[in-house]
Image: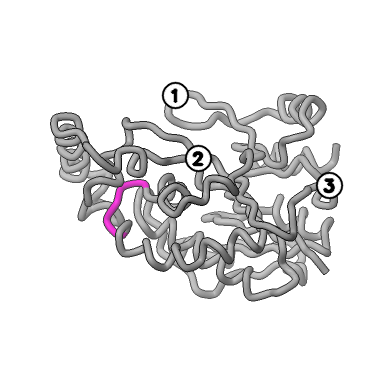
Amino acid sequence: MNKNCVLVQAHKSIPYIFNLAKLNPNVNFYIHFDKKSDINIISGGGTPENIIILSDRVNVQWGGISQVEATICLLLEALKNPENMFFHLVSGECLFIKDFDEIQMANNQPELFMDVRFSTEFTYRVRFDCIFSDSKYLKSLIGKCFVKFNKIVDKIFPLNKNEKLYSAYGSSWFSINRQGLEMLCPYIHKEMPFFKYKVCPDEHFFQYIVYKYNLMEFVKENKRYLVWCGNHPKYLELEEILNVRSKSNDIWVVRKVTCDVALNYLTN
């Protein structure tokens, strides 16, 4: 049986995901809770059989390689089940607006529904290491000064090669079929050491791999909807979500969404 599976990175209670799992018993849900989180907060009548909570948990630091490590833990765990054919990476603030039985992916060739863009604004992240990237000190004064220095050097001494490779970036939330994930696996392990001390590697890691190894032909539209407000996506209201669902057949997931809005959506 070809199954969808949902891979969730979370740091707090996610009742929407638990309810979604109960409504979709043929979909497997894999959840990684930040190691700093108390998973005893997860309650609500027990865990459905189709939810797997990862026991190998990563201490996730914003802006560090640990975010990528948590993603890889989810992908590799889900890949162990041969029935899982379609993989959807989401955060605890994502909401599915497409029924799983309506989600279409190929099962005979790789498909990556991934956001891949290019901007020289972010080349410094991939070009230079930052020893504070996976620690609490990234947001400290010394960490911010370190990052600022890298930005300045990148502007003064621009790249004359590999510019497009280092400028590849995009959302860390994507969907992929089994053939696509199996295609990426060797490169994932190969490139992890390079990204160990990069800043915000979750926004570059998979895009870097796709471009470096000439896999762009397999990249499809991301199937996500979000609205930027400054440097961060804004929280969507229920009315806007329903409007997106009614007008677009190409969107599978919207973000960001509060817990209350997500639960209200399930009742509509």
**Magenta span dominant secondary structure:** loop
Distance from the alpha carbon under mark 2 to that under mark 3: 24 Å
Q: Which residue is mark 1?
A: 230
Instruction: Select label 2 or label 3 by which is in front.
Output: 2
Q: Residue at x 57, y 46 (%)?
A: 217
Q: Secondary structure at mark 2?
A: loop
Q: Callout 3 environment at 10 Å: few (<14), some (14 to 19), or many (20+)?
A: few
Task: Judge whether 238 appears above or below 216 on screen.
Answer: above
Residue that carries the numbered disc 2 in the rendered image? 116
Q: Looking at the image, is mark 2 or mark 1 nearer the viewer?
A: 2
Residue 126 is left or right of residue 74, and the answer is left
Residue range of the region highlighted in magenta in the rendering = 196-200
Q: Amino acid at mark 2?
A: Val
The answer to if 5 sits in the magenta stretch is: no
Residue 102 has which mark? 3
Q: Residue at x 62, y 46 (%)?
A: 113
